[in-house]
Image (tube, rainbow, N blue to C red):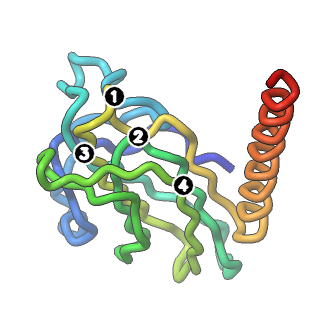
C-alpha cells in the first residue's frame, strides 16, 4: 500500500522519537503526503521552499502480525532521516537546520522492519536548502517485505526497459 494521506507536520522543527514520548508535541498542520510543503495553505502553516520539518505517521497493523515488513522510500529532492518505533533506520544525505548543516542526496531507500507491536510510529525529518520545493512528492510504499521488494524490483525493471529502449533509439538515429 502507499502511505498517502495526512501526516502530522512540524515546520522548522527537527524532532526525535524522544520528543514525542511526553505527548506535548502538537503538529503545526496535517500535511498531505505526497506533496511539497510549499503547497500547504499559508493560512494554516507558513512554509518556505527552504527549511526543515518533521513528518509523523502512526500505522495500525493487524493484531498479532509477525511478518517482516518493508518500506520503500522514494527519491526526495532533499535530505531526510527516518525513525520507526524510535529506532533510526537510515536516511538520504544529512538533514540539518541550516544550509551549512545539510548535505542533500538523491537516492531511493528500502528498509526492512520487524514489528514488535500492533502499531508503527514513523518519523521522517526532512530538510531542503537546494531544491525549489521541499518535502516528498512521491508516495511511500509499505507492506510485507516480499511484496514491497517485488514491487521495487518491478519498478527497476520498468525503468531499465525504458532506458534501454531510449538508448536503442538514440543509437539508431546516430
Q: Quadrant of the C terminus?
A: top right
Q: Is residue 88 above or below residue 162?
A: below
Q: Residue at x 27, y 41 (%)?
A: 128
Q: Residue at x 87, y 27 (%)?
A: 172
Quote the CA–CA distance across marks 4 and 2.
11 Å
Quote the CA–CA distance across marks 4 and 1.
18 Å
Q: Specify whether 74 is left or right of 13.
A: right
Q: Earlier in the sequence, mark 2 or mark 1?
A: 2
Q: Earlier in the sequence, mark 4 or mark 1?
A: 4
Q: Secondary structure at mark 3?
A: strand
Classify mark 3: residues with Cα within 10 Å, few (<14), some (14-19) or many (20+): many
| Quadrant of the rendered image containing residue 164 | top right
Q: Specify the label residue 108 is tagged with.
A: 4
Q: Residue at x 56, y 69 (%)?
A: 111
In the picture of the structure, the residue carrying the numbered disc 1 is 133
Q: Position of residue 81 (x, y in %)?
A: 35, 61
Q: Earlier in the sequence, mark 4 or mark 2?
A: 2
Q: Secondary structure at mark 4?
A: loop
Q: Specify whether 119 is left or right of 29.
A: right
Q: Is residue 40 above or below residue 9?
A: above
Quote the CA–CA distance across marks 3 and 1.
13 Å
Q: Residue at x 37, y 34 (%)?
A: 31
Q: Earlier in the sequence, mark 3 or mark 1?
A: 3
Q: Position of residue 106 (x, y in %)?
A: 45, 49
Amino acid at each position: 500500500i502507499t502511505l498517502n494521506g495526512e501526516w502530522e507536520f512540524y515546520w522548522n522543527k527537527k524532532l526525535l522519537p524522544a520528543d514525542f514520548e511526553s505527548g506535548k508535541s502538537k503538529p503545526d498542520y496535517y500535511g498531505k503526503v505526497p506533496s511539497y510543503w510549499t503547497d500547504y495553505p499559508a493560512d494554516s502553516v507558513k512554509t518556505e521552499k527552504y527549511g526543515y520539518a518533521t513528518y509523523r505517521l502512526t500505522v495500525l497493523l493487524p493484531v498479532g502480525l509477525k511478518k517482516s515488513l518493508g518500506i520503500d522510500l522514494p527519491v526526495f529532492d532533499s535530505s531526510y532521516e527516518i525513525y520507526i518505533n524510535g529506532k533510526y533506520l537510515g536516511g538520504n544525505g544529512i538533514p540539518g537546520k541550516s544550509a551549512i548543516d545539510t548535505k542533500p542526496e538523491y537516492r531511493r531507500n528500502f528498509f526492512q522492519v520487524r514489528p514488535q507491536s500492533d502499531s508503527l510510529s514513523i518519523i521522517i525529518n526532512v530538510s531542503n536548502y537546494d531544491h525549489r520545493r521541499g518535502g516528498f512528492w512521491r508516495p511511500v510504499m509499505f507492506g510485507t517485505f516480499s511484496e514491497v521488494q517485488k514491487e521495487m524490483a518491478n519498478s527497476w525493471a520498468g525503468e531499465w526497459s525504458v532506458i534501454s529502449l531510449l538508448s536503442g533509439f538514440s543509437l539508431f538515429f546516430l
